């Protein structure tokens, strides 16, 4: 078991001396942004063309669903959100801080990414994890 | 040389835990063989689609039930496009003149409950990083349409009302039950905007088709009930900026539709009926536009106006669709070919689309694969 919390996905980075962030891979030839590690570009076919890029923690809600039935042990309802990040990259996560009702959710609403414990979930070795979530962007942004 | 469907059938979809996957496939294979009056000994190859036992040599095990003749067997797995892919491989082998009469089978035995969302290392991501369940994935695809065109929950729900109504006329559908709009909208919410009655039914099922060359079809004297395959197209998903988190079922369908219309030498206005991939009610709305059945942004209107009902301008999912006939993944892409063929033969009984001459079938396998077939009745 690790003494520190682990990132829930490989593209969530937890630097020793800085804030957590999401990492993208961007093609140096065509500019396509991918979330998740890769070597070659599936948009233009360029080989060994990827550089890492720090994805924004600000974005807009593109689409969503409101989950009322899930697998046993998962708290419902919750909002599953697809967010386009500023500057490229689209990620999916839980949108918190809104009522789980379509009347309170607007397309393109500005949201921010934040990082927190993975709802108390631990793996079979007892490790805890850090996950990312979305919340409505604060007014000052 | 053209290829023709000379025999095609499906078993009634349902739940058959006492039967094995090869048994279900064998039942459908025998029905299709009986439909054209040929024995298994006449089949020159078997193309078998199945998903949940993809490494289990299902095609060979079907032949172990009905006749081990030593023919080549190809086992196919391509998500929910599995059956259509098996059919297409069979069709391609006849077009290539490798064989002049072959068998395609699609079969699946399903559990109950939600599909998707499991797997992966570490901890479960479901409910932590949004949802990967199929009802959610297609809810998100549906709300993308709402975002673009203002499509409403009620319009999505009407798809389910229509398809359940159609299935009351289909004795081979899982259900024959009317579901009024209020019933659909008030059934258990699974993932907004998909309620339980707006999700396809997990069922066991099998369907099969015998495909022959034009020359062989004439030699066998089977042309009068034959169905001509005017187009067979398979696509995968082109790169799209959101497709890593939001599987794109639209672009691959549009690409397949335009290729299919070109191959068939016709357009959407020539299509008399459509069986499309209504895995969720939200999905059907998207595909009206993707298949060119209406202009972009008009899908909500054509469900409101009844254009896609039996008796309407272009009836969609007269079988009851995946929503009510049921969705046995690997069988679906041949079962919809059975449905359209039955109309083109004028043998669909109460649900017959009058005067149907040309029909289209469509499936989507998430991940993604799109299969489209355009079929034409010979006797019509």
Image (cartoon, helix red, strand yellow):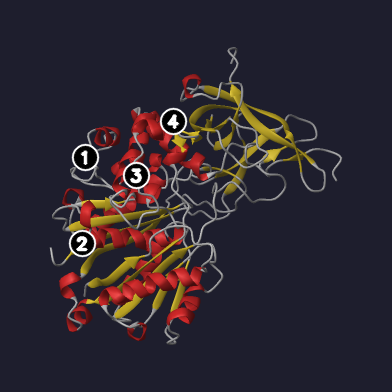
**Vertical position of residue B376 compared to residue B177: above or below:** below
Q: Secondary structure at mark 1?
A: loop
Residue, disc 3: B164
| Discs 4, 2: same chain | yes
Q: Residues within 10 Å of mark 3 (few under 14, many from 20)?
A: many
Q: Secondary structure at mark 2?
A: loop
From the top left corner, tell me how far across and down residue B345 is, in percent.
Answer: 19, 64
Proximity of marks 4 and 1: CB atoms separated by less than 8 Å: no
* Residue A99 figure quarter: top right
- Disc 4/disc 2 C-alpha distance (Å): 36 Å
Q: Residues within 10 Å of mark 4 (few under 14, many from 20)?
A: few
User: Can the viewer see residue B66?
Assistant: yes
**Which quadrant of the rendered structure holds the N terminus of chain B?**
bottom left
- Disc 4/disc 1 C-alpha distance (Å): 25 Å
Q: Mark 1 — on which chain does it sit?
A: B
Residue, disc 4: B186
The image's mark for residue B132 is none
In primary-sequence order, the first of circles 1 and 3 is 3
| Picture residue at 66% right of the left edge, 33% below the top | A132
| Picture residue at 56% right of the left edge, 43% below the top | B132
In primary-sequence order, the first of circles 4 and 1 is 4
From the top left corner, tell me how far across and down residue A126 is, in percent.
Answer: 82, 44
| Discs 1, 2: same chain | yes
* Residue A135 figure quarter: top right
The nearer-to-camera label among 4 and 1 is 4
In the image, A81: left or right of B314? right
In primary-sequence order, the first of circles 3 and 4 is 3
Q: Residues within 10 Å of mark 1 (few under 14, many from 20)?
A: some
In primary-sequence order, the first of circles 3 and 2 is 3
Residue, disc 2: B347
Residue, disc 1: B307
């Amino acid at each position: 078991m690790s003494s520190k919390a682990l990132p829930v996905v490989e593209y969530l980075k937890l630097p020793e001396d800085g804030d957590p962030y999401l990492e993208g891979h961007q093609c140096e030839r065509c500019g396509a942004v991918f979330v998740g590690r890769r070597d070659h570009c599936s948009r233009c076919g360029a080989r060994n063309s990827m550089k890492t890029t720090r994805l924004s923690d600000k974005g807009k809600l593109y689409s969503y669903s409101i989950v009322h039935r899930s697998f046993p042990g998962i708290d419902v309802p919750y909002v599953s959100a697809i967010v386009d990040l500023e500057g490229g990259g689209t990620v999916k996560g839980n949108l918190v801080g809104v009522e789980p009702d379509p009347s309170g959710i607007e397309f393109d609403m500005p949201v921010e990414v934040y990082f927190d414990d993975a709802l108390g979930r631990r793996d079979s070795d007892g490790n805890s994890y850090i996950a990312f979530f979305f919340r409505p962007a604060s007014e000052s942004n | 040389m053209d290829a023709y469907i000379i025999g095609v059938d499906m078993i009634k979809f349902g739940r058959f835990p006492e039967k094995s996957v090869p048994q279900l496939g064998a039942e459908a294979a025998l029905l299709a063989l009986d439909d054209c009056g040929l024995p298994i000994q006449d089949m020159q190859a078997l193309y078998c689609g199945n998903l949940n036992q993809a490494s289990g040599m299902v095609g060979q095990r079907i032949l172990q039930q009905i006749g081990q003749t030593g023919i080549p067997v190809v086992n196919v797995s391509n998500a929910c496009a599995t059956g259509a892919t098996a059919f297409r491989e069979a069709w391609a082998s006849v077009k290539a003149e490798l064989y002049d009469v072959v068998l395609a089978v699609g079969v699946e035995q399903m559990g109950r409950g939600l599909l998707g969302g499991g797997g992966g290392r570490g901890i479960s991501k479901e409910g932590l990083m949004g949802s990967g369940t199929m009802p959610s994935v297609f809810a998100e695809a549906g709300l993308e349409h709402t975002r673009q065109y203002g499509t409403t929950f009620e319009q999505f729900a009407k798809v389910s009302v229509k398809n359940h109504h159609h299935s009351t006329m289909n004795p081979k559908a899982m259900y024959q039950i009317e579901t009024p709009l209020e019933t659909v909208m008030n059934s258990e919410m699974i993932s907004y905007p998909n309620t339980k009655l707006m999700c396809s039914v997990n069922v066991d099922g099998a369907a099969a088709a015998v495909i022959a060359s034009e020359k062989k079809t004439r030699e066998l004297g089977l042309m009068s009930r034959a169905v001509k395959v005017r187009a067979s197209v398979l696509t995968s998903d082109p790169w799209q900026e959101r497709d890593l988190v939001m599987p794109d079922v639209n672009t691959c369908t549009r690409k397949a539709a335009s290729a299919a219309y070109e191959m068939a030498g016709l357009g959407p206005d020539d299509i008399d009926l459509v069986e499309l991939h209504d895995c969720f009610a939200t999905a059907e709305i998207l595909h009206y536009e993707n298949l060119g059945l209406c202009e972009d942004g008009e899908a909500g209107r054509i469900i409101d106006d009844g254009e896609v009902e039996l008796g309407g301008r272009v009836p969609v999912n007269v079988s009851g669709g995946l929503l009510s006939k049921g969705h046995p993944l690997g069988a679906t892409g041949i079962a919809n070919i059975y449905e359209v063929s039955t109309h083109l033969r004028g043998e669909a009984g109460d649900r017959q689309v009058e005067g149907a001459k040309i029909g289209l079938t469509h499936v989507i396998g998430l991940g993604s694969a799109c299969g489209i077939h355009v079929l034409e009745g010979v006797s019509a």
